[in-house]
Amino acid sequence: MASNPTPDNDDIALALAEDLADGCHQLEVTLNIKQNTEAVMRAAIDTAAAARLAYPAAVQARQQATANHAAADEAGKVTIANCRLRLVKLFGTVYSAQWASAGFPNQSTAVPDNMDQRFTLLNSLRLYFTANPASESADMEATAALCAAAHTALSNARQALNNAETAATTALQTRKDAMKSLRRNRIRGLIDELGTLMPEDDARYETFGLNVPANPTAPGAIASLTLTALGGGKVLARWDYATRMAGTRVQTRRVGIDDDFVTLATVEALEKVIEGQTPGQQLEVKVTPYNAAGDGPPAPVQSIVVV
């Protein structure tokens, strides 16, 4: 149904799905909707919305796991450095078979630059001091127990990071799958189902937030627009969904410079980062929804000082 395309943008798809579910609430029984009922639509909406929330949480958990991993590695570096100072007293500063027996790689007595080599070296030092307790020095914090603790902490942090990476990847795929199902099976499914239940000139299409196929109309109004200064000459514009919108025309006017609004871009999302502005400049922004039938009422113009 060309007059009612399936939105590509997730936010718009979810908003349309809500309108469709509301339409089902009013007309499901009257129209005898069987496949994509209100209950089915709302379950799909909830699944997609939950998946969208789960992904940022998984990303945040991955960021925390990355930070914990880095901290464990830094602690491991300190342990290796302490052990190195102890072994210098025993072996000298020149690499030798003794240094090799303690596990130092690359024919070097330095703390390795490579994280994986540091991880392996901690375990080697644990084994060395366990086999050679006379070489330990509690005062210099160079013991098998300290190496074991550092190695275990880093091992746990590495596993936690691997788990967090897997969880984030899974959450992203789950989000994609949930939105794909919402679009293909529910939004498109209900629009197509309505096409079998109503003639193309039936005004009740608008109850579902859709265009009447035989007589498409422009979108409804965008209720609000908010602007946020991001710094570096950037401004984030965000606006509400307008019924039947296919996209949004974003226009700007630099107060005192531009005589009228200039079209910056047309977007299918509900937000746009406006870049390349001059800090200190007052900027006015206007967003207008559109579809194949024309433009809808724009949101009230908002103004911000660029930073």
Image (cartoon, rainbow, N blue to C red):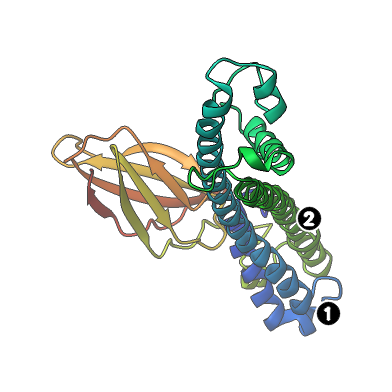
Say which quarter of the image contains residue 263.
top left
Instruction: Determine whether, in the image, residue 283 is placed left or right of residue 46.
Output: left
Say which quarter of the image contains residue 105.
top right
Q: How many marks?
A: 2
| Residue closer to the observer: 298 or 15 | 15
Quickly name the residue at label 1.
32
| Residue closer to the observer: 250 or 115 | 115
In the displayed structure, would residue 168 be above or below residue 99?
below
Dividing the image into 4 quarters, which one contains the C terminus?
A: top left
* Residue 108 image point, x, y percent: 60, 18
Say which quarter of the image contains residue 50.
bottom right
Quickly name the residue at label 2.
184
Instruction: Determine whether, in the image, residue 180 is placed left or right of residue 116.
Output: right
The amino acid type found where label 1 is placed reads Asn
| Residue closer to the observer: 67 or 103 | 103
Q: Residue at x 20, y 35 (%)?
A: 258
What numbered label is drawn on residue 87?
none
Q: Nearer the viewer, mark 1 or mark 2?
A: 2
Among numbered discs 1 and 2, the one appearing first in the sequence:
1
Q: Residue at the left extreme?
A: 256
* Residue 44 image point, x, y percent: 74, 68
The span from disc 1 to disc 2 (Cα, nearest Å) is 21 Å
